[in-house]
Structure formats: C-alpha cells, structure tokens
Amino acid sequence: MEKRNNVTEFVLLGLTKNPKMQKIIFVVFLVIYVITVVGNVLIVVTITTSTSLRSPMYFFLSYLSFIDTCYSSVNAPKIIVDSFRERKTILFNWCMIQVFGEHFFGGVEVILLTVMAYDRYVAICKPLHYTTIMNWRVCSLLMGVSWMGGFLHAIIQILFIFRLPFCGPNVIDHFMCDLNPLLNLACTDTHTLGLFVAANSGFICLLNFLLLMVSYVVILRSLRTHSSEGRRKALSTCISHITVVVLFFVPCIFVYMRPVATLPVDKAVAVFYAIITPMLNPLIYTLRNAQMKNAIKKLCNRKATLGDE
C-alpha cells in the first residue's frame, strides 16, 4: 500500500457544540479526572507504604491503579482543554500517540485483570500452595508479561494505522482519536483491516472476558467448602473484581467486536470505559475492602500527625 498523506491534523467534533453544555462538560470531566488521579495515586501510595498490604493481590492492585491513572490521562486532559475551544484539533502525530496510549494502557489492563483473576483463583482454590505458586518472582514475571503484551498489542495497531493513506477528509466525529473513526477517514478499502481490528482488539477482549467469567464461576463454586467468614471475605473480593471486569470489558467488546462503523452511541460508551471506569476502580476496591480502608485511615492519620508536629 503506497502511503499518501495530505492530512497534518484532524478536527474533533467533540461531545457537543452547545457552549453551555461544553461548560458543564469542563466541570464534570475536571472533577472526574481529579477524583481519578487522587483516588488511584492514594491507592498506590497506601499499598507502597503500608506493611499490612504486602500480598500479591495488593501488588497487582497498585499497578492497576497506576495504569488507570495513565489510561485516564491519555484522553481526559485533552477533553477538558477542548471544552474551551470552538475548533478542536489534534496534530496527526499526536493523534497516533493518543491511539498508541489508549491501546497500550488498555492492553496492559486487560492482561492484568486476567492475572488478578488467576491470583484470586490460587488464593481461594489452592490456599495451601498460594505462597509457593504466587511467589514474588512469579508476580514480577506476570506483571512483565502484562506490560509486554500491552506494548505488542498497541504497536501492532499503530503500525497498521500509521501506514494508512489519509488524503482528504480529516473531521472525526468523536472527542478522541480511535481506530474506527480513523479507518473511516482513510482513502483506501479498510474492510480487511477492520476485520483485523475486530480480531486484535474485539476478539481478545471477548476471549479474556469469557475466561475471566469462567474463572470466577469456578472460584464462587469452590466457596461452598469454605467457612462462613472465609466465604464472606472471598465473596467480597470477587464481587469487586467482577464489577471492574464487567465495567471495563463490556464497553470495549461493544466498540471493537463489530465491523468498522461509527455509531452515535460510541461517544457515550467511550466516555464510560476511557474516563469513568478508571475513576470507579479505586472506589470499588476501597469501599469493599476493609483492609484497604484501614490502611488509608492509618496513612491519613500519619500525615495529620506529621503535620501537627
């Protein structure tokens, strides 16, 4: 495919053209972004500094919070700044960087959520062998696989998109650069590439989602042999994980597991998985986890004590 590229920037139509709604979008998205960053950074700091949160589950949770902060930062600042602009544009190279960031951090999160499900499976179904199986070497290896898998997923996507010829239309009916809107603008037949996107993004999301659901069904079935207290703790943890998995995977499957097309509902779905879900993750994990709440209280009390001295 010979690359012909006359496009140096893309015009984003954003969420709305209504000036009043844009002011509301600025306030709402700024609040969401601040909560996302503060909440996730608080979890990372709490786990890093607390001696009571040294298990593999919290090790993975700290990385999930870090990834959510980065994932949200790919799009949220741009949306907030663009809410002041009548004409919303993004340079071609920055558009490619945005696509790479979305799929890099999204890919890492997909794999990491699968790793966290495996960790819960071992902890609940094989408790006597947990420390042997989930030793720190294995945890570090699984975390490395998550980062490498996300990088490979993103680099494959960006290599195909970057080679597409963009020779005319440059208006994207979205608030961010993404695969489907860009495929619609390319001045070549993208049907085959659209199927590849569905396989590389949609099918991977669907397969991981099904694997996760099966693993949690196995875990929940195994809880019948546990004591009532053990069952309650394990059930609380699993419900938190399942909630995060559903909130993240279902919108992604809807967007990527279909032929190339831009639907009006895509913007609302993208807001949910790219902006809102990273904010909900720290709330879900902390509100249902007594150990995390106690560690956060201790951290805040320690900071208050240091401030009084």
Image (cartoon, rainbow, N blue to C red):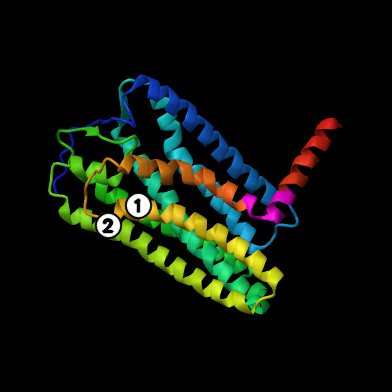
Left or right, 290 with respect to 147, comes to right
Q: Residue at x 70, y 59 (%)?
A: 54
Q: What range of the chain is rendered magenta?
A: 286-295
Q: Nearer the viewer, residue 12 or 103?
A: 12
Residue type at tag 1: Ile
Image x and y of residue 121, in percent: 56, 71
Residue 244, horizontal then vertical, whole percent: 50, 55
Judge whether 77 appears above or below 235 on screen: above
Q: Which mark is residue 198?
A: 2
Q: Position of residue 199 (x, y in %)?
A: 28, 60
SS assignment at label 1: helix
Near mark 1 (Cα within 10 A), the count class, few <14, some 14-19 or many ≥20, is some
The location of residue 46, given as percent across then percent down, is: 69, 48
Q: For marks 1 and 2, give the one nearer the viewer.
A: 2
Does the magenta stretch mainly form a helix, a strand or a loop? Answer: helix
Q: Are marks 1 and 2 in contact (CB under 8 Å)?
A: no
Position of 294 relative to 27 (above/below):
below
* Above or below, 18 relative to 102: above
Left or right side of 81 for 10: left
Judge whether residue 295 can be spotted in this image.
yes
Work out whether residue 125 can be spotted: no
Gap in angstroms between the C-alphas marked 1 and 2 = 16 Å
Q: Nearer the viewer, residue 137 or 121?
A: 121
| Residue matched to label 1 | 155
